[in-house]
């Protein structure tokens, strides 16, 4: 049990959140966002703070499997939720297929937006709605990349979609 | 962010009683607007009532073939619902023209209705703003007002309502179900949001302690000839400079029934039901569409930087009506405007 992680002397609320498969019992002041909880006391600094206002997508994580901007979620509102961050997708020795595809396609330059891009892309694949490159581009429009690695990002996602057999990417992969 | 008390409502009744008891309290749904405004110190609730556990997450069938949409249905769940796509594709289309997949996953139906303006001055507590602090003045009048209203503004406020979803709901003539400590009532969508007048601090007609619990949309015949056309500074992830939700029933080249609502141009989705009725029976052609645009924009007034919105809205109306009449709705993925 993690006690009073951020709460010394401040009013806190108790919540249970599963983070990357591990159940955490946390006492958190209500004004702490999920992003600040992750990066601060939980030391999961893979998730990045870009604009902190939902305008860039760098903080994207998966909550109960759905991609969400963690900067606009109060951690206290997530009692009982399952959160997956970039650290929970794969490890350096055992990369998630999307991480591998990003490396293979050079889908980043500075890398700051990459954890959010990858979490968002994993959410996109799970949603199962992308059928074309135009779909990928539109459905990734919530993740900005200041280096402009967009076309390589789309390549990486296209490859994973093909490998997963999504229509019509299935034909493309065969 | 300032400190606040946090409670989780277990029933709608608990939520509205708590809300009515504390004028300093605000409801928390998806958080995508409220948390943002709290970070900018624009919203300063002393208490947050988290409504995310309330049983308002379903889309239910109505006897007439319409749908009842719970206030906590996410924007994504609503846009991709098979029944909504089939019966009210205008609504799906408008939602998918807005925000981003991540935001739409978090944003809720109720929160979308209640989202506040994106006026730059409203967001900046160091400037006067009648909406944020009544009586301080409006910095946008005579200031930077490129994104502001061309219709229905007042000398107190020229802000616009930023929602895409609400423009479609206005065109479809939805009903808003509201619950307060004293019971329930229905509000016609057209009457839900208000013009700024003397009280720009009030965006809508909810009374203290009331919350939105659902929307109802009656079955209609607008699932073939419709479009949502949104014009903005970049093709995705940007608010509308002007948008048009248009739907019609056409028979033998004539307009049988017309619905048209404008977004990004006023303090509320702009719809003129009287004007719509006058165009019933007219030829569904460009000459008629130009007259409709003239009629809808007859009172339009620019503020300087936003003067361009008047011809922009005019062209958008004509183009949207052509798309609707042809049954060729604007594609929200391939953004080329046909
Ligand atoms: C970067 C960015 C881009 C965006 N782009 C677009 C866009 O292009 N088009 C568009 O339409 N929108 C856009 N949005 C806005 C987004 O749609 C809204 O923030 C969202 O719909 C609000 O819903 P929510 O559930 O998160 O509301 P919250 O933030 O939880 O609440 C917003 C307000 O509604 C009140 N509220 C919530 N639920 C209820 C209820 N049931 N009854 C009464 N009051 C309630 C809250 O108290 C609060 O005052 C964008 C937002 C961001 C951050
Ligand atoms: S337009 Fe309205 S919201 Fe903007 S500064 Fe003026 S009063 Fe405030």
Image (cartoon, rainbow, N blue to C red):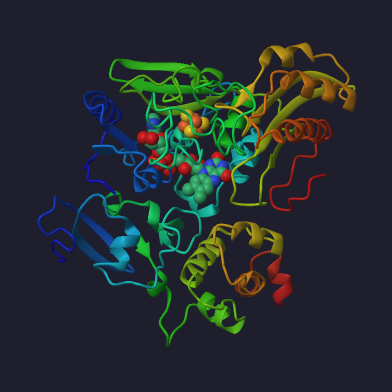
Q: Estimate the x, y position of residue B266 in percent, counting from the top left.
A: 59, 27
Whether residue B242 is situated above or below residue A39 in the rendered picture: above
Which is nearer the eye, B120 or B35?
A: B120
Q: Residue at x 53, y 75 (%)?
A: A98
Q: Quadrant of the N terminus of chain A?
A: bottom left
Which is nearer the eye, A173 or B91?
A: B91
Which is nearer the eye, A114 or B227?
A: A114
Q: Residue at x 72, y 77 (%)?
A: A174
Write down the quadrant of residue A131 in the picture: bottom right
Give the farthest residue toward the bottom: A93
Q: Is residue B69 visible?
A: no
Give the farthest residue toward the left: A9
Q: Estimate the x, y position of residue A172 in percent, counting from the top left.
A: 73, 73
Write down the quadrant of residue A65 in the picture: bottom left
Give the farthest residue toward the front: B142
Q: Is residue A44 visible?
A: yes
Q: Estimate the x, y position of residue A59 in percent, counting from the top left.
A: 43, 62
Q: Residue at x 50, y 23 (%)?
A: B193
Whether residue A110 is situated above or below residue B313 in the rendered picture: below
Q: Estimate the x, y position of residue B270 in percent, counting from the top left.
A: 62, 24
Q: Residue at x 72, y 22 (%)?
A: B297
**In the visual, does A80 lie left or right of B205?**
left
Count of picture labels: 0
**In the visual, does A55 lie left or right of B221?**
left
């Amino acid at each position: 049990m993690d006690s009073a992680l951020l709460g010394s002397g401040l009013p806190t609320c108790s919540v249970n959140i599963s983070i990357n498969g591990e159940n955490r019992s946390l006492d958190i002041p209500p004004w702490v966002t999920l992003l600040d909880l992750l990066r601060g006391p939980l030391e999961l600094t893979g998730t990045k703070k870009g604009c902190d206002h939902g305008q860039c997508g760098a903080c994207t994580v998966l909550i109960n499997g759905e991609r969400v901007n963690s900067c606009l979620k109060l951690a206290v509102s997530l009692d009982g939720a399952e959160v997956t961050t970039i650290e929970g997708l794969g490890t350096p020795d055992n990369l998630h297929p999307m991480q591998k595809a990003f490396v293979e396609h050079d889908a980043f330059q500075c890398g700051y937006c990459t954890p959010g891009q990858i979490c968002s892309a994993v959410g996109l694949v799970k949603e199962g709605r992308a059928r074309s490159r135009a779909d990928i581009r539109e459905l990734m429009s919530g993740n900005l990349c200041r280096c402009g690695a967009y076309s390589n990002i789309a390549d990486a996602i296209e490859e994973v979609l093909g490998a997963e057999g999504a229509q019509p990417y299935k034909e493309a992969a065969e | 962010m300032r400190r606040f008390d946090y409670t989780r409502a277990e029933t709608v009744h608990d939520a509205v009683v708590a809300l009515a008891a504390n004028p300093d309290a605000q409801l928390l749904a998806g958080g995508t607007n409220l948390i943002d405004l709290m970070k900018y110190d624009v919203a300063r609730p002393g208490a947050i009532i988290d409504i995310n556990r309330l049983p308002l997450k379903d889309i239910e069938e109505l006897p007439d073939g319409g749908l009842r949409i719970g206030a906590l249905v996410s924007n994504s769940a609503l846009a991709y619902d098979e029944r909504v796509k089939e019966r009210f594709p205008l609504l799906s289309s408008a939602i998918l023209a807005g925000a981003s997949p991540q935001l739409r996953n978090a944003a809720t139906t109720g929160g979308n209705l209640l989202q506040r303006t994106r006026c730059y001055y409203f967001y900046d507590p160091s400037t006067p703003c009648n909406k944020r602090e009544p009586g301080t003045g409006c910095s946008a009048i005579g200031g930077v007002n490129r994104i502001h209203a061309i219709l229905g503004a007042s000398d107190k406020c020229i802000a616009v309502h930023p929602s895409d979803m609400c423009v479609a709901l206005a065109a479809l003539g939805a009903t808003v179900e509201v619950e307060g400590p004293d019971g329930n009532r229905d509000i016609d969508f057209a009457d839900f949001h208000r013009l700024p007048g003397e009280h720009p601090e009030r965006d809508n007609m909810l009374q203290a302690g009331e919350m939105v619990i659902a929307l109802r949309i009656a079955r209609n015949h607008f699932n073939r000839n419709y479009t949502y056309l949104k014009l903005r500074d970049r093709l995705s992830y940007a608010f509308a400079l002007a948008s048009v939700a248009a739907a019609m029933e056409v028979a033998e080249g004539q307009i049988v029934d017309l619905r048209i609502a404008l977004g990004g141009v006023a303090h509320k989705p702009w719809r003129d039901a009287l004007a719509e009725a006058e165009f019933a029976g007219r030829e569904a052609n460009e000459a008629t569409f130009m007259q409709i645009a003239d009629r809808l924009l007859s009172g339009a007034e620019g503020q300087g930087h936003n003067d361009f919105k008047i011809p922009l809205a005019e062209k958008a109306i004509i183009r949207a009506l052509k798309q609707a009449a042809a049954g060729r709705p604007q594609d929200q993925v391939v953004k080329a405007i046909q």
